[in-house]
């Protein structure tokens, strides 16, 4: 998407970038949710997507925060079928730290 809009190629090899991310994994409770059915002349199609909450480890934000911010600014998710997706990014202090 960044390449399409800005003619900028962020990575020579995305797989190398992903392999460099810290071993910690995001935690969350994501589920698939069907929102509605689109009725067509020949067939109907269920529309839905992933919804829920994900906690991104600090190590990931330090390593990939710029890419995550780009996803937010370019509305990655919002380009889902019929504009039915998006995500919010919030800074939160874990209860164990507060």
Image (cartoon, rainbow, N blue to C red):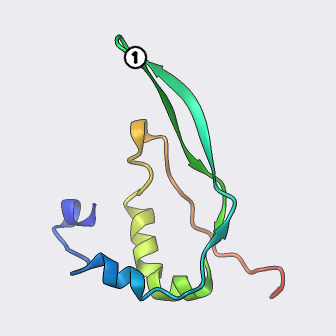
In the displayed structure, 43 sits above or below 22; it is above
Q: Which of 26 and 67 is in front in this view?
A: 26
Q: Give the residue displayed 50% in from the left and 52% down from the top.
A: 86
Q: Give the residue displayed 27% in from the left and 65% down from the top.
A: 2
Left or right: 59, with 18 as reference point: right
Quadrant of the rendered image containing residue 43: top left
| Residue 69 locus on image (x, y percent) | 45, 72
Quadrant of the rendered image containing residue 13: bottom left
- Residue position for label 1: 43
In the displayed structure, 7 sits above or below 94; it is above
Q: Give the residue displayed 43% in from the left and 41% down from the top.
A: 83
Q: Quadrant of the C terminus?
A: bottom right
| Residue 12 locus on image (x, y percent) | 21, 81
Give the farthest residue toward the left.
7
In the displayed structure, 97 sits above or below 51; it is below
| Residue 93 locus on image (x, y percent) | 74, 80
Q: How crowded is mark 1: few (under 14 residues within 10 Å), some or many (20 or more)?
A: few
Give the farthest residue toward the top.
41
Q: Nearer the viewer, residue 37 or 73?
A: 37
Left or right: 8, with 60 as reference point: left
Left or right: 97, with 59 as reference point: right
Q: Is mark 1 on a helix, strand or loop?
A: loop
Q: Quadrant of the N terminus?
A: bottom left
Left or right: 17, with 4 as reference point: right
Badge count = 1
Q: Give the residue displayed 41% in from the left and 45% down from the top.
A: 80
């Amino acid at each position: 998407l960044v390449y399409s809009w800005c003619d900028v190629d962020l990575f020579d090899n995305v797989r190398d970038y992903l392999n460099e991310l810290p071993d910690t994994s995001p935690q969350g409770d994501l589920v698939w949710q069907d929102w509605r059915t689109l009725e067509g002349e020949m067939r109907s199609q269920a529309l839905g997507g992933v919804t829920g909450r994900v906690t991104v480890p600090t190590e990931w934000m330090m390593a990939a925060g710029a890419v995550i911010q780009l996803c937010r600014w370019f509305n990655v998710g919002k380009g889902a079928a019929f504009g039915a997706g998006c995500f919010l990014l919030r800074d939160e202090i874990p209860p164990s730290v507060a």
